Image (cartoon, grey):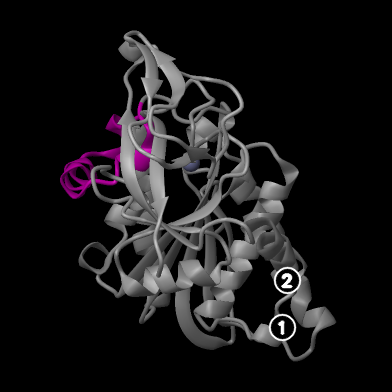
C-alpha cells in the first residue's frame, strides 16, 4: 500500500540490504522528496532500457514531516529532526495516535513505518539515508555517525564529509537509527544536497541515492547512470574531503539572531571576523575556521556551525 508517508518501494529479485531514504524531514526541503519520486520512476524503466539491470535488496522512500511539508514550513511546533530521542519515542509509542498531533504524531508514524518495513522485508542490514537541503547556498555535504561504514559510504558519495556532528546536538535521525533501536545492523547518513529551492539540489540528491545504492551493493557500477554523479564530483572538487565540527552556535528567539548577508557554506573565516548580530551586538568567530549552514530562514535552533578540515 502506498500511503502519503511512502513515496515508493522497489524490491529487486535478489535479496540484499534494505535502504530507507527520507525526504522532507524538514517540511521546507522538497528536493529529497522530489529526487525520490524521480528515482522510483527511473528504477521502473531501467529494466526496460537495460536488460542486464538487476537490483539487490529493497529501496523505500519516505516523507519525513508530512504536515510541515503541506505548509512549506521547516516544522509546525518543534524541529522533527531534533525529536529522535529514545525516551521520548518510547513514551509517545505508548499513547494512542489520536491523542498526538504535529511533530509528535509524525515521529511515531515514522518509527512505526520503518519498523513495518523491517518486519516486511526482514533485511540482514538496514541503511538510512536522510536527504536534506540548507537555507544558504553551496551546502553540499554528508553528515555521518562515528561508525566507520557510515564515513566510508559518505566519502563514496563524492561530497565533503562532516564528522563529529552528533556530539552536542541531540535527537537527529542519525542518533536514533542504529542497531539497538532497529534490531538489525544499521548504518545511517545524512546528505545535504544544496539550497532548498535550487533545481540542482534535486539532481545532487539523485546522485547521492544512486551512489549509495552502488556502494551498498544494490546496483552494479555499470548499471548506474552517472550524469548526476559528475555534477557532484565537479561541484565538490575544491571542497574539503573530510571536516570536523568544532562549534555550534545555538540560538533562541529571544537572541534575535540575524546572520549578516552573503555568507556561504565552506567559506573561510578569520579569528575575530563578525558574521552575525544578535541582541548583544555583533557575533564574531574566535578562531580561523570554515563556516557551515549559516541560517537564512526564520525557523532554526542553530545560527551557524563552524568546522575545520581534517586529513583522513
Ligand atoms: Zn533539513
The residue drawn where x is 47% and y is 84% is 16
The residue drawn where x is 71% and y is 58% is 38
Q: Let me know if residue 98 is in the magenta part.
A: yes
Q: Which is the main secondary structure of the residues drawn in magenta?
A: helix
The residue drawn where x is 53% and y is 78% is 215
Work out which residue is located at the far right of the displayed protein and give it: 49
Q: Residue 104: give x, y in percent of width and height.
A: 32, 35
Whether residue 228 is visible to the viewer of this picture, yes or no, is yes
Q: Which mark is residue 186?
A: none
Q: Nearer the viewer, residue 198 or 291?
A: 291
* Quarter residue 227 falls in: bottom right
Q: Nearer the viewer, residue 113 or 217?
A: 217
Q: Residue 241: give x, y in percent of width and height.
A: 50, 63
Give the residue number, with chain letter if any, for mark 2: 44
Q: Which residues are magenta?
A: 78-102
In the rendered image, which quarter contains the C terminus?
bottom left
Element type at mark 1: helix
Q: Is residue 298 left or right of residue 247?
A: right
Q: Residue 153: give x, y in percent of width and height.
A: 47, 72
Amino acid at each position: 500500500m502506498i500511503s502519503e508517508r511512502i513515496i515508493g518501494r522497489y524490491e529487486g529479485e535478489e535479496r540484499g540490504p534494505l535502504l530507507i531514504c527520507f525526504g522532507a524531514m524538514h517540511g521546507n526541503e522538497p528536493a529529497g522528496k522530489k529526487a525520490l519520486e524521480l528515482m522510483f520512476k527511473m528504477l521502473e524503466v531501467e529494466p526496460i532500457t537495460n536488460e542486464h539491470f538487476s537490483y539487490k535488496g529493497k529501496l523505500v522512500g519516505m516523507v519525513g514531516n508530512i504536515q510541515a511539508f503541506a505548509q512549506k514550513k521547516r516544522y509546525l511546533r518543534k524541529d522533527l529532526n531534533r525529536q529522535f530521542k529514545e525516551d521520548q519515542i518510547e513514551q509517545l509509542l505508548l499513547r494512542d495516535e489520536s491523542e498526538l498531533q504535529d511533530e509528535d504524531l509524525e515521529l511515531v508514524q515514522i518509527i512505526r513505518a520503518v519498523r513495518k518495513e523491517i518486519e516486511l522485508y526482514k533485511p540482514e542490514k538496514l541503511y538510512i539515508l536522510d536527504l536534506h537541503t540548507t537555507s544558504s547556498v553551496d551546502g553540499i555535504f554528508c553528515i555521518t555517525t562515528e561508525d566507520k561504514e557510515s564515513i566510508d559510504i559518505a566519502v563514496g558519495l563524492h561530497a565533503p564529509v562532516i564528522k563529529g556532528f552528533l556530539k552536542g546536538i541531540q535527537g537527529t535521525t542519525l542518533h536514533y537509527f542504529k542497531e539497538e533501536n532497529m534490531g538489525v545492523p544499521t548504518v545511517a547518513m545524512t546528505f545535504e544536497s544544496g539550497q532548498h529551492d535550487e533545481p540542482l539540489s534535486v539532481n545532487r540528491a539523485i546522485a547521492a541515492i544512486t551512489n549509495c545504492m552502488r556502494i551498498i551493493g544494490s546496483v552494479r557500477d555499470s548499471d548506474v547512470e552517472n550524469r548526476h554523479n559528475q555534477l557532484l564530483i565537479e561541484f565538490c572538487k575544491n571542497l574539503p574531503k573530510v571536516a570536523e565540527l568544532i562549534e555550534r552556535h545555538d540560538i533562541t528567539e529571544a537572541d534575535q539572531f540575524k546572520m549578516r548577508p552573503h555568507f556561504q557554506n565552506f567559506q573561510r573565516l578569520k579569528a575575530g571576523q563578525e558574521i552575525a548580530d544578535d541582541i548583544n551586538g555583533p557575533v564574531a568567530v574566535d578562531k580561523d575556521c570554515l563556516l557551515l549552514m549559516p541560517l537564512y530562514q526564520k525557523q532554526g535552533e542553530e545560527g551557524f556551525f563552524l568546522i575545520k578540515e581534517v586529513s583522513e
